[in-house]
């Protein structure tokens, strides 16, 4: 079978990409704007450069209102800062809940009982219990009228590391534990 993406609806293209580009790491992004906290997961996320150290996260719009950007989008655009946490296995259920579409300004951490910890005064807090986090600043975006999601390039200023780490990856509509890692020879 050969699918022509020019003849497939964007909703179906998303399902095909998300179900076949696997596993995808999950960025659990914390932003802060005028004292309001936002915590949200994104699986269109990856590292793209080590010089300068850059992450890319693709941020879409709220459903069903395609024209309204997500809170993370608004907050990064306005404050230029984000803390990108990597979700540990024991927090994936709470992380998944934070993907719920809520009105602007609703604090997901309070709503879903997620503890936050301020580790640097210049960046939003981390999700307590996350063993890895990147403290980042907006480096740039790539915006185009045709795109349903906007790639945000985030420059890493600091990295938080705490002990061993079992990351969660997105696989289609579910999550996976990475159980076996083979070393390079």
Image (cartoon, rainbow, N blue to C red):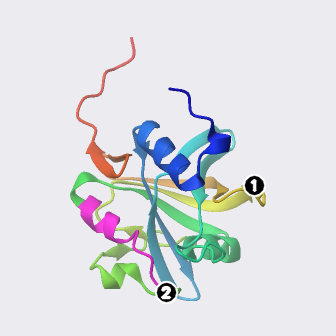
Residue at 57 percent of width and 73 percent of height = 70
Task: Name the residue at 49% across, 86% down.
Answer: 103
Local packing at callout 1 (Cα closer than 10 Å; few below 14, some 14-19, many 20+) is few
Which of 66 and 106 lies nearest the eye of the viewer?
Answer: 66
Residue 154 seen in the figure: yes
- Residue 142: mark: 1
The C terminus sits in image quarter: top left
**In the structure shown, which secondary structural element does the residue marked by tag 1 occupy?**
loop
Q: Is residue 174 above or below residue 47?
A: below
Residue 160 higher or lower than 52, as above or below: below
Residue position marked by numbered label 2 in the rendering: 103
Give the residue displayed 64% in from the left and 43% down from the top. 7
Compared across the picture, whether 1 is left or right of 113 comes to: right
Task: Report if residue 82 lies within the magenta region.
Answer: no
**For the magenta stretch, what is the residue range?**
91-102
In this orientation, which residue lies closer to the viewer: 20 or 154?
A: 20
The total of numbered circles placed on residues is 2
Q: Which residue lies furthest to the right in this view?
A: 144
Spatial separation of the CA atoms under disc 1 and disc 2? 26 Å
| Rendered image quadrant of residue 94 | bottom left
Q: Which residue is drawn at 62% across and 70% down?
A: 73
Please report whichever mark, 1 or 2, sits nearer to the chain's N-terminal start: 2
Image location (x, y in percent) of residue 150? 67, 59
Q: Residues within 10 Å of mark 2 (few under 14, many from 20)?
A: few
**Viewer-proximal residue, 105 or 126?**
105
| Location of residue 137 by image quarter | bottom right
Q: Are marks 1 and 2 in contact (CB under 8 Å)?
A: no
Residue 58 on image: x %, y %: 59, 55
């Amino acid at each position: 079978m050969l699918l022509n993406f020019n003849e497939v609806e964007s909703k179906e293209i998303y399902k095909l990409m998300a179900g076949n580009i696997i596993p995808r790491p999950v960025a659990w992004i914390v932003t802060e704007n005028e004292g309001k906290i936002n915590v949200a997961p994104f699986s269109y996320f990856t590292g793209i450069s080590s010089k300068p150290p850059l992450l890319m996260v693709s941020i879409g719009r709220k459903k069903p209102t395609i024209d309204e950007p997500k809170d993370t989008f608004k907050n990064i655009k306005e404050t230029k800062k984000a803390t990108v946490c990597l979700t540990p296995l024991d927090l994936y259920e709470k992380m998944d809940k934070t993907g719920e579409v809520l009105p602007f300004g609703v604090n997901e951490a309070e709503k879903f009982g997620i503890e936050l910890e301020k580790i640097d005064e210049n960046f939003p807090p981390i999700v307590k219990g996350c063993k890895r986090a990147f403290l980042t600043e907006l480096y740039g975006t790539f915006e185009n009228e045709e795109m349903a999601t906007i790639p945000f390039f985030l420059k890493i200023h600091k990295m938080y590391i705490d002990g061993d780490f079992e990351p969660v990856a997105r696989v289609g509509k579910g999550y996976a534990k990475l159980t076996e890692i083979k070393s390079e020879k």
